[in-house]
Amino acid sequence: MSAAVETQSADTGLMRVSSDKISRLMDLVGELSLSVSETVQSPDLNGLVLSNFDTAVHRLNMIVREVQDAATDLRLVPIDDVFRRLRRMVRELERQTGKSIDMVIEGGDTAIDKLVADKLYDPLLHVVRNSADHGLEPSDERVASGKPAQGRITLSAAQVGSEVQIIVADDGRGLSRDRILRKAREKGFFGPDEEPEPSALWKCIFEPGFSTAETVSNLSGRGVGMDVLNSTMTALRGRIAVDSTAGAGTRVALHIPVSLAFLDCIILRLGQQLFAVPIDVVSEIARPAPGELLGISAEGGSEMFRLRGKHIPICRLDHFYGAPTRGDADSPSSVLVVFNTSSGAIAVPVDEILDRQQVVMKPLVGRLSRVRASWGCALLGTGEVALVLDCERLGAGVTA
């Protein structure tokens, strides 16, 4: 055997590296990005004439961005590792429930952050258990209703923009609106005569202690599981969408960022406060013309922005957070940033759009963790800190 062949056979192209070392590398890359920004934007450079400096800075920023992307890719793993573990659990669920279940997996090669993958198994297991126990009917009941005797649970994943979308869908009986509404009224979530929209009602199943099971078993009835999913998704900066049709099944969709370390954002200024918004949720930026801002109605409705014939609720951040920003959102120079959320579009007035950046995310800890509608803070190269807005919770607060 030649030396070249021996070298090729010995080099498998794979290395085992501790996840702690990769996390350390991610932290250092984040600090490198901040240090480069601080150096480039140093006030000591003001007024200096530096030939070719802008070209060198542009190249340096491009290299740092590539290093960030390469470091992020090191921590990505296929989600199929999680899906395979769930497939094994389905065999156990078949034995416990006495039902025949076909587990279909799609998009197992979708890449996701290792830290996210490590936290997804238990929440997804609760969703699959609910589908097997509550969703899928027994074989005789399925045949009587014209369905195949074997129930189906589909577990799929796909990357959509900077998010990974994970869907758990079954072809069972669907969520029982009557039972969930009765339990929700017992717990005081809705009034005795209130008829909530399906999207609002389905959110109740994620409340701690909420269960419609009449008996307690090792699969259900303890009121834990779905609330674990909700808290895990909040920690991962993700969101949940539930859709159910009676007799046709239930679909639970999880939307999770691909990476937790860096985030592509637009930096906004309102008064003296800086905000960062993930660029994927920004629909458009508009400067309102006279007559397009509609005041709060006498019936207690929201302030509206009329955009091409559509009325979009306005969320004023100084009102939302109950703190003056010393900005004038009604000034002629103010702009409206329109965000897309699962609750519908919302418009946020700001004084200025500053920049588009890939920011380093840091969580809010201690008393700051109670700040509403925020994913954390973004450290900017100027040394300033911007609050990263969670537009989903911001939209829910406006449309509620």
Image: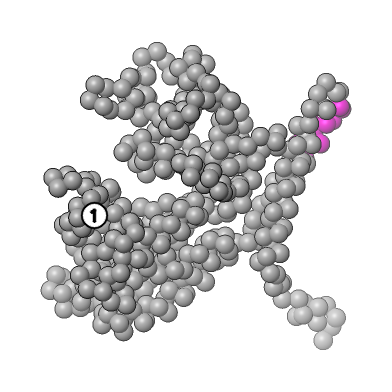
Q: Position of residue 51 (x, y in %)?
A: 87, 27
Q: Mark yes or no: residue 224 visible.
A: yes
Q: Position of residue 206 (x, y in %)?
A: 34, 57
Q: Position of residue 335 (x, y in %)?
A: 49, 22
- Does 195 sit left or right of 227 as displayed? left
Residue 361 higher or lower than 51, as above or below: below
Residue 19 higher or lower than 362, as above or below: below
Among the 4 quarters of the image, the one containing residue 380: top right
- Does 104 sit left or right of 378 as displayed? left
Q: Position of residue 126 (x, y in %)?
A: 37, 68
Coloring basis for residues: one colour
Q: Of 222 and 105, which appears nearest the observer?
A: 222
Q: Quadrant of the C terminus?
A: top left
Residue drawn 18% across the image and 60% down it: 179
Give the magenta-colored segment's residue range: 50-59
Q: Of 122 and 169, which appears nearest the observer?
A: 122
Q: Residue furthest bottom?
A: 1
Residue drawn 61% across the image and 47% down it: 362
In reply to whether residue 106 is colored magenta, the answer given is no
- Does 323 sit left or right of 66 as displayed? left
Among the 4 quarters of the image, the one containing residue 303: top left
- Does 47 sit left or right of 125 as displayed? right
Helix, strand or loop: magenta stretch: helix
- Which residue corresponds to mark 1? 187
Residue type marked 1 = Lys
Q: Mark yes or no: residue 246 visible.
A: no
Residue 241 higher or lower than 269, as above or below: below
Residue drawn 28% across the image and 48% down it: 199
Residue drawn 76% across the image and 42% down it: 35
